[in-house]
């Protein structure tokens, strides 16, 4: 090999080594742009899904109202006045609401983090060297 070719190879290698930081920065920029586009597309999909669930919830709520009215009319068809039928349906809904509230209250009691919080405090105190 001639000395001239050796000089060109060294210059090419040094140029490649010098270009590495620029290439790495460009790679990171391209990856961040790709990530940004992917997250934007996913957020858009989640937003559309959430909106559709909200619309479905509104229709389910309207269906519940119609079923309540149908229950009132059904009871009234037995010969009771409409006001009495409405009171019977309202009473049933009240009983359901009370049962759900009691179950919810019982669930709150299960979620008490008291023991865990105390355990963490003891661990922190032990780490600090404080005896309780």
Image: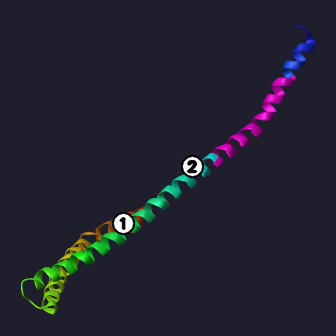
Q: Nearer the viewer, mark 1 or mark 2?
A: 1
- The one of 29 and 22 positioned closer to us in this rendering: 29
Mark number displayed over residue 56: 1
Q: Position of residue 69 (x, y in %)?
A: 21, 81
The answer to which image quadrant residue 4 occupies is top right
Q: Residue furthest left?
A: 78
Q: Quadrant of the C terminus?
A: bottom left
Question: At which x and y percent is residue 61?
Answer: 31, 74
Residue 15 seen in this snapshot: yes
113 relative to 40 in the view: left or right: left
Q: Residue 31 — which label?
A: none
Residue 43 within the segment the image draws in magenta: no
Q: Which mark is residue 38?
A: 2
Question: In terms of secondary structure, where does tag 1 sit?
Answer: helix
Image side of residue 121 versus residue 77, left or right = right
Extent of the magenta region: 11-33
Q: Residue 123 appears in which quarter of the rendering?
A: bottom left
């Amino acid at each position: 090999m001639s000395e001239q070719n050796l000089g060109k190879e060294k210059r090419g290698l040094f140029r490649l080594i010098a270009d590495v930081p620029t290439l790495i920065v460009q790679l990171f920029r391209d990856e961040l742009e790709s990530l940004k586009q992917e997250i934007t597309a996913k957020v858009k999909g989640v937003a559309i899904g959430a909106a559709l669930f909200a619309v479905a919830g509104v229709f389910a709520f309207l269906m519940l109202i119609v079923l309540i009215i149908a229950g009132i009319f059904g009871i009234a068809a037995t010969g009771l006045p409409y006001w009495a039928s409405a009171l019977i349906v309202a009473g049933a809904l009240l009983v359901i609401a009370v049962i759900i509230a009691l179950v919810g209250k019982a669930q709150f009691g299960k979620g008490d983090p008291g023991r865990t919080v105390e355990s963490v405090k003891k661990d922190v105190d032990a780490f600090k060297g404080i005896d309780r």
